[in-house]
Image (tube, helix red, strand yellow):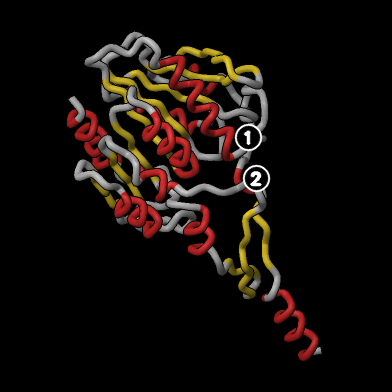
């Protein structure tokens, strides 16, 4: 019996755990519009046209134009999730118009989610909200976790983005898998592989960026280790870059760990773009 158990363990150790888009994109969480109605800033709900229909969107401080922050959020929840509403509200407190939207397949947004679709969705949002951007208006992208992938792409591609904030950024699919290569399950270490179609390389993309970057990362982040954020930081070719470490920070949600440090970091970054 003992020999059988040992052989079974060795067998499992040679297996791999495939990561599919269903593991990355958690689209089925409860949608509750009453949550945004209860927020301090009373955001406006809009449906922005997309190739597959529309993207459900909330606009905080819609009357403000001089400062705009567009959130490319992480892969869980939707625009009614308190976690994202609280983040958007905090950013709105910096005297900014804040755009929070659901990717395709999330909440009320039509279509389905994929790595490629994230970028398409973000571009649709930017085209709509920045089409009448004035010369002195400031627009920044705020990417979180997997949302940093499209945020970096759009920041490199577009001239109407003035800066980008990256919270818990993933440097590349390869680095992400390498960092999580040995995932322990029941005492056995498994290889982790990505399904075809799930690939990205933000390190290569960010080498072409020409605008200021602020990276926020939790030292205790076990989902996206801080080393991945530092790898990305080192690849930024310009001097206008800042890395802020949150010693007690886990994965994303850094505003919950140290709200004062979080707000001052984003505020200072916003002011530096003036």
Is 272 left or right of 32, judged from the image as shown? Answer: left
Q: In which quarter of the image is the N terminus?
A: bottom right
Mark 1, secondary structure of its residue: loop
Label 1 – label 2 distance at C-alpha: 8 Å
Residue plotted at (49% across, 31% down): 82
The residue that mark 1 highlights is: 113
| Dot 1 or dot 2, earlier in sequence | 2
CB contact under 8 Å: marks 1 and 2: yes
Residue plotted at (25% across, 37% down): 212
Q: In which quarter of the image is the C terminus?
A: top left
List x then y, in percent, for residue 201. Answer: 47, 49
Residue plotted at (60% across, 46% down): 24
> Crowdedness of circle 1 by 10 Å Cα count: few (<14), some, many (20+)?
many
> Crowdedness of circle 2 by 10 Å Cα count: few (<14), some, many (20+)?
some
The residue that mark 2 highlights is: 21
List x then y, in percent, for residue 95. Answer: 27, 20
Q: Is residue 9 above or below residue 207?
A: below
List x then y, in percent, for residue 164. Answer: 33, 35
Is 223 left or right of 158, judged from the image as shown? Answer: right
Looking at the image, can residue 220 be seen? no
């Amino acid at each position: 019996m003992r020999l059988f158990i040992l052989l079974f363990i060795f067998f499992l150790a040679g297996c791999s755990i495939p990561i599919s888009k269903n593991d990355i994109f958690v689209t089925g969480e409860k949608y509750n519009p009453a949550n945004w109605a209860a927020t301090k800033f009373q955001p406006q709900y809009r449906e922005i046209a997309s190739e597959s229909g529309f993207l459900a969107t909330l606009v905080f401080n819609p009357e403000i134009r001089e400062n705009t922050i567009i959130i490319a959020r992480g892969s869980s929840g939707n625009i009614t999730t308190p976690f994202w509403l609280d983040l958007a509200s905090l950013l709105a407190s910096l005297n900014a118009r804040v755009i929070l939207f659901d990717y395709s397949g999330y909440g009320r947004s039509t279509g389905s989610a994929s790595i490629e679709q994230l970028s398409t969705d973000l571009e649709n949002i930017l085209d709509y909200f920045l089409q009448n951007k004035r010369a002195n208006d400031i627009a920044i992208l705020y990417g979180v976790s997997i949302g940093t992938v499209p945020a970096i792409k759009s920041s490199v591609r577009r001239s109407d983005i003035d800066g980008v904030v990256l919270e818990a950024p993933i440097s590349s699919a390869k680095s992400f898998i390498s960092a999580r290569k040995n995932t322990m399950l029941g005492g056995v270490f498994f290889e982790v592989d990505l399904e075809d179609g799930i690939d990205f390389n933000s390190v290569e993309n960010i080498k072409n960026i020409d605008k200021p970057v602020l990276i926020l990362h939790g030292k205790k982040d076990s989902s996206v280790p801080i080393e991945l954020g530092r790898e990305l930081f080192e690849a930024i070719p310009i001097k206008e870059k800042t890395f802020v470490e949150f010693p007690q920070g886990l994965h994303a949600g850094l505003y919950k760990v140290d709200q004062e440090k979080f707000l001052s970091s984003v505020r200072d970054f916003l002011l530096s773009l003036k």
